[in-house]
Amino acid sequence: MLIVMEKGSTEEQIQAAVNTIEKRGYTARPIPGGDRVSIGILHNKGSVDAAHFLGLDGVKEVIPVTKPYKLVSRELQKENTRIKVGDAVFGNGSLPVIAGPCAVESREQILSIARSVKKAGAKLFRGGAFKPRTSPYSFQGLGEEGLQYLAHAREETGLPIVTEVMDVENFDIVEEYADVVQIGTRNMQNFSLLRRAGKSRRPVVLKRGMSAMLQEWLMAAEYIMEEGNPNVILCERGVRTFVRHSRNTLDLSVVPAAKKESHLPVIVDPSHASGVRDQVVPLACACAALGADGIMIEVHNNPDEALSDGAQSLYPKQFADVMEKINAIHAIVGQK
Amino acid sequence: MLIVMEKGSTEEQIQAAVNTIEKRGYTARPIPGGDRVSIGILHNKGSVDAAHFLGLDGVKEVIPVTKPYKLVSRELQKENTRIKVGDAVFGNGSLPVIAGPCAVESREQILSIARSVKKAGAKLFRGGAFKPRTSPYSFQGLGEEGLQYLAHAREETGLPIVTEVMDVENFDIVEEYADVVQIGTRNMQNFSLLRRAGKSRRPVVLKRGMSAMLQEWLMAAEYIMEEGNPNVILCERGVRTFVRHSRNTLDLSVVPAAKKESHLPVIVDPSHASGVRDQVVPLACACAALGADGIMIEVHNNPDEALSDGAQSLYPKQFADVMEKINAIHAIVGQK
Amino acid sequence: MLIVMEKGSTEEQIQAAVNTIEKRGYTARPIPGGDRVSIGILHNKGSVDAAHFLGLDGVKEVIPVTKPYKLVSRELQKENTRIKVGDAVFGNGSLPVIAGPCAVESREQILSIARSVKKAGAKLFRGGAFKPRTSPYSFQGLGEEGLQYLAHAREETGLPIVTEVMDVENFDIVEEYADVVQIGTRNMQNFSLLRRAGKSRRPVVLKRGMSAMLQEWLMAAEYIMEEGNPNVILCERGVRTFVRHSRNTLDLSVVPAAKKESHLPVIVDPSHASGVRDQVVPLACACAALGADGIMIEVHNNPDEALSDGAQSLYPKQFADVMEKINAIHAIVGQK
Amino acid sequence: MLIVMEKGSTEEQIQAAVNTIEKRGYTARPIPGGDRVSIGILHNKGSVDAAHFLGLDGVKEVIPVTKPYKLVSRELQKENTRIKVGDAVFGNGSLPVIAGPCAVESREQILSIARSVKKAGAKLFRGGAFKPRTSPYSFQGLGEEGLQYLAHAREETGLPIVTEVMDVENFDIVEEYADVVQIGTRNMQNFSLLRRAGKSRRPVVLKRGMSAMLQEWLMAAEYIMEEGNPNVILCERGVRTFVRHSRNTLDLSVVPAAKKESHLPVIVDPSHASGVRDQVVPLACACAALGADGIMIEVHNNPDEALSDGAQSLYPKQFADVMEKINAIHAIVGQK
């Protein structure tokens, strides 16, 4: 933390700031500059709250220097975290693809899609049994029945299951069926849910919040790790911006940025980002070229009849085509 | 819902779209235009999912016409909802002010602040016992002990208590102590929590999500109302934008816009919006001039020592000054 | 400028950074911290480009400490700049209102509106003769003919004229007719135009760019001042965000923030910010309560027939009502 | 255009809206719905301004249905526009790369970089002689001297030159030296400059504005085409969002979206989007995989000493590596 004093701040103001810092148990180191004084704060354990100093007399600005996260930080752990699920490994340079419908609708639907994505090369199967919906009047998912269909599809295909958990109440049951538990965008800062996920034995896919800074996303992962679960997979899925040609704006820069700050694997979901099938195919190829640690793609056997998010789901044939391209691209950029 | 076909779409494509609409139980009404055809969808109950039609052959765009909310809509209920808490009424043209510290820190702090804000004219007292914090290492609140201090302050001052509930697990206990339950920004789309709040007998302050559209915010209120609780107070608290001179960007336009769409009262929290004391004072005056149904302001007896958000908390003397201005401004704009 | 080295960066890396700094003529001051080293850069004249150091080995972050602007800065000039135009003064604590139609359409329109806004208490008259339009097929303004109508209205009413200049080519002619020259949102970083405005003898209203940081806006004003024109009036007019209930999001926090950083007057245009008449009235009142140095409001004698931006223009009667409220509010907050 | 009336709007209100429409020369077609009436507007030439109807009594919303652009629209011209410059073609499925430094600094620098990017496979050379800079105190470019160095590099390497023009005043001279003229982000809605570019015989690279909607960008291209210049290359370069881990947020969805709406080629500049070298390499690969019509990359022989934007410039060796990957990826996705 660096405290920047105003030009012409007095000795008294500087001393008052120093006192405030030291009263909190930190070391204050004044740094006389060309035309103003700054004060460094040292020996802090954990993060220091800028708010403590921002309102002091003569203080112009408070600038955080160190980052507040620990367990997720690459400064703590240099090597990539590798998370193995079934045949797939996230974080070892491979490119596992998670595919499936937005929502579980029926046993037949689930089996049919699971078989076709397995055939095309997907390594994990996704599908929502508990659906977070903007409207209380929209289809809310099949609940445990949906989880059973997913389990059935796993038996038939061998594909591990990724499915969303919406609340602490249903965590036990989701955990029982799922191989990987997903925490959705709207729950990225549902801290009770994060803590519960931290006590789980399942790997967690943590979707980035709709307007989350990189640092907030990593802090959400820190909540999970701090409770004892080291297996967090970060998933970029688009952020909210002013644009209207896509549902969200896929922020691909965050992938190299997150991998620089953290040792956790980072995957991308181009389906929710764009919301339109025509954009999902090129964006999925872009994710492969980018060096992501995995891709999550929505596929539906009959998108035009889907109960949710049909417009962004690929047809099985489209998915098979895109898998071919993805794998070829990964072969070019993957060796690093 | 209006479906716009591409220029030169064929009769077959148009008929296919009509069939898809009618298969879902709606009425399709083709509207031949100058150089393209549109198709209106009628007789839908509730909202129609654009996704069902967006991927069809020959369809260029799908445009929602009606809004998906019902219970919150002013089309359903013309008169303002009025919510009475203690001496205050939200929604009747008055301007009740909710004041207090960000977090409950100690019995003495709470009593001292409660007394000073009561004296300055606040009608409700706020303070967080369960604190949602970006970092797991930050002060998380005193929990039930904090609620007890708030209850004690209520006994001493008569001010009703507004406090945040973070999860379903602690809802019962928060509800037991609080007069008004607050759902925070990060939980605006925590649907399990919204449903639980819908079963509560307490009025709910529903803060707008950091990047929530007006429509999403109203749909979150719809979740609460749909479970049976009609007493929802909407609270604008700033949205996330690119700016860096304030923590968030206070979106005052949303107040008249929300009041046009909905009969629910809309209040504003300028403290969290700006994050800086120097901005809170002028913004609070602006809220009063705008015709908001209430204002929520952070006040701390010793902001420089506050455990959270000290920089945005007003000193008691500042708060008393701003209350005077607010009341004088409200006397000018209030009579409508 | 503060350079933060990575944890565990070597002596060689630190020395290399120091050398790079000193090679550019600055003083480097290494600051050993708890677990990493930072290096302060001193004795820089003007701003230092972070890019010079960001790519160096072992450098984690480069943090600007001082601000790059000079002439606009309140650190250079403590007292408010006061700009007198006709009867109005911007920056002395008064609240002059600039009113008029979006575009000049005819001699009769201009005279009629000018008379009614004068009667209601406006101090300056606005109207566009050269119109920046998103579409080349939209009405582009009457050009010099429009300027002549404005001049005629000035003769009749005594109100000074504010009108937009879109390019260097037409600057001479606009300057000849106008009392205050306006640079629009889309031209905030048209640096050639800014320089030309800096050579003008007219005060300049500089509208904030649609996604301009405070610092960029002040730097645009710096371009004008640096060429010799000290009379710059900053005008907030809403920024682009994700919201859809208003055309832009009025950022009222920027007013106290800009006034803290700079001595220049800051006014607000709620008409372009909201784009909807129903929002302009409450927002104009909010601007008055906020302590802005002026307000710019669109008024049209016949908004339903206006050639541009009719939906955001007030009816003359509405404007008269809002002027009354604005003046009463200013009487409350104005004495500071 | 579709006008949606409020529930319960009267016959008189509907008739008044119809009259207003027809008075403007359009055809009004009322569409009775389940519980509200909408009115379609037909036979409009060019775009209709929503503002004309938004304020009418009983009107709830005005929804644009058709797009306002013509010449840029794929509805007008089905086949891709192909623009040939030297050996490169934009729009024929190939992937020409434009490379070079941000700013022209010296004759030696320019020659050295031009030779190395040519060797690595770039098809065009870029470099700025007139630099738009946020600060008036930053390096503003060498002007005509810079153009001469660029011309010299062209003679030596055969690479055509892309360089930015900042204003109408310098257009003639830039046009004289450049093979392709670039209009920068801050000038995307400098309409006088767009018109001048429309009279040029040179192809134009039109960078997307920092917060431009797709439609506004296409309308800016329409300004150029409408003046007679059909050779416009659209260039995505990142938009401004709340994120802080990159300078801007690269919006890759806009590439397929723009190519769907328009026949013009769309290229991407990942250097300005990210602002950090470590992100440029993966993003450039992503652009290749996406199916862009070209990529623009900053390369500097000595980034640590660059006068502008050094941190985002690739080293020549890095550029050569990325060219190999780009070409291999393009070979996979290019054949469509």
Image (cartoon, coloured by chain):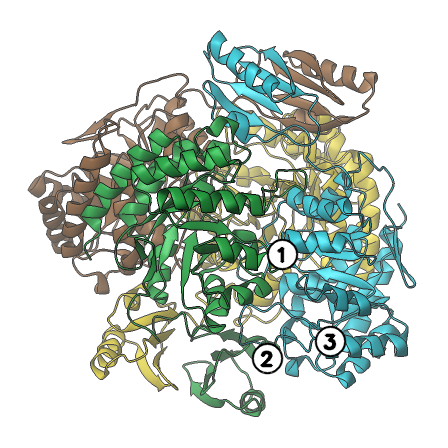
Chain colours: A green, B cyan, C yellow, D brown
Image depth: mark 3 or mark 2 in front: 3
Residue type at mark 1: give it: Val
**Residue C92 visible:** no
- Residue at (63% x, 12% y) in the render: D26
Q: CA distance from mark 3 to mark 2?
A: 25 Å
Question: To which chain does the residue with label 2 belong?
Answer: A
Q: CA distance from mark 3 to mark 1?
A: 47 Å
Q: Are marks 1 and 2 on the same chain?
A: no
Answer with left or right where residue B169 lies relative to residue A147. Answer: right
Residue nearest the observer in this picture, C134 or B44: B44
Q: Which residue is mark 2?
A: A52
How many other residues sit within 10 Å of disc 3, few (<14), some (14-19) or many (≥20)? some
Query: Does the residue at mark 1 contact the one at mark 2 (Cβ under 8 Å)?
Result: no
Query: Does the residue at mark 3 contact the one at mark 1 (Cβ under 8 Å)?
Result: no
Residue type at mark 3: give it: Glu
Image depth: mark 3 or mark 1 in front: 3
Answer with left or right where residue D13 lies relative to residue A55. Answer: right
Instruction: Determine the residue located farthest toward the right in the rendered image.
Output: B87
Look at the picture and state if C217 lies above or below B34: below
Residue D252, x across and y down, in percent: 37, 41
Answer with left or right where residue B62 lies relative to residue B270. Answer: left
Question: To which chain does the residue with label 3 belong?
Answer: B
Q: Which residue is mark 1?
A: C266
Look at the picture and state if D211 lies above or below A88: above
Q: CA distance from mark 1 to mark 2?
A: 30 Å
Q: Which residue is mark 3?
A: B144
Numbered label attached to residue C287: none
Residue type at mark 2: give it: His
Residue C191, x across and y down, in percent: 42, 48
